[in-house]
């Protein structure tokens, strides 16, 4: 799957937040998106993949070198603000 196909697949998920629910994630679409990403990370060969009940998805991409280098973390939101939807 190329980058554009992947992006178009992602934007089909309804991840709009609902601040009135007092839940995390605040809507079912956010968790469905996280589950889809979890499956994709497995297919891509990432390791230590976890998805908790709050929708926090984490995975490790193993190093491809034996050199000691700093660890890099990427953090992103799965939700979208109702103000921007």
Image (cartoon, helix red, strand yellow):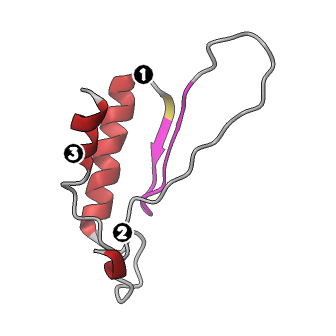
Name the side, left or right, on which 13 lies relative to 44.
left
* Placement of 10 over or under 61, stated as above or below: below
Mark nearer the N terminus (3 vs 2): 3
Residue occupying image coordinates x 39% and y 33% = 41
Find the magenta span and give its range: 49-61
Instruction: Name the one closer to the observer, 59 or 83.
Output: 83
* Placement of 15 over or under 10, stated as above or below: below
The residue tagged 2 is 80
The location of residue 70, given as percent across then percent down, is 77, 31
Quadrant of the image occupied by residue 13:
bottom left
Instruction: Name the one closer to the observer, 9 or 84.
Output: 84
Residue occupying image coordinates x 78% and y 13% = 67
Name the side, left or right, on which 8 lies relative to 60.
left
Graded by Cα atoms within 10 Å as few (under 14), some (14 to 19) or many (20 or more), the crowding at tag 1 reads few
The residue tagged 1 is 45
Graded by Cα atoms within 10 Å as few (under 14), some (14 to 19) or many (20 or more), the crowding at tag 3 reads few
Mark nearer the N terminus (1 vs 2): 1
User: Is residue 48 shown in magenta?
Assistant: no
Graded by Cα atoms within 10 Å as few (under 14), some (14 to 19) or many (20 or more), the crowding at tag 2 reads some
Give the spatial CA distance, label 3 vs label 1: 22 Å
The location of residue 39, given as percent across then percent down, is 31, 36
Quadrant of the image occupied by residue 81:
bottom left
Residue at disc 2, secondary structure: loop
Q: Which mark is residue 73?
A: none
* Placement of 11 over or under 45, stated as above or below: below
Q: Which mark is residue 8?
A: 3
Give the spatial CA distance, label 3 vs label 2: 16 Å
Instruction: Please identify the quadrant where the C terminus is shown.
Output: bottom left
């Amino acid at each position: 799957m190329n980058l554009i196909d992947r992006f178009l697949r992602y934007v089909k998920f309804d991840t709009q937040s609902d601040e009135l629910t007092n839940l995390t994630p605040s809507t079912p679409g956010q968790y469905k998106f996280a589950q889809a990403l979890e499956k994709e990370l497995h297919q891509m060969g990432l390791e230590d993949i976890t998805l908790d009940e709050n929708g926090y998805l984490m995975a490790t991409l193993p190093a491809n070198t034996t050199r000691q280098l700093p660890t890099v973390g990427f953090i992103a939101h799965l939700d979208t603000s109702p103000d921007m939807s």
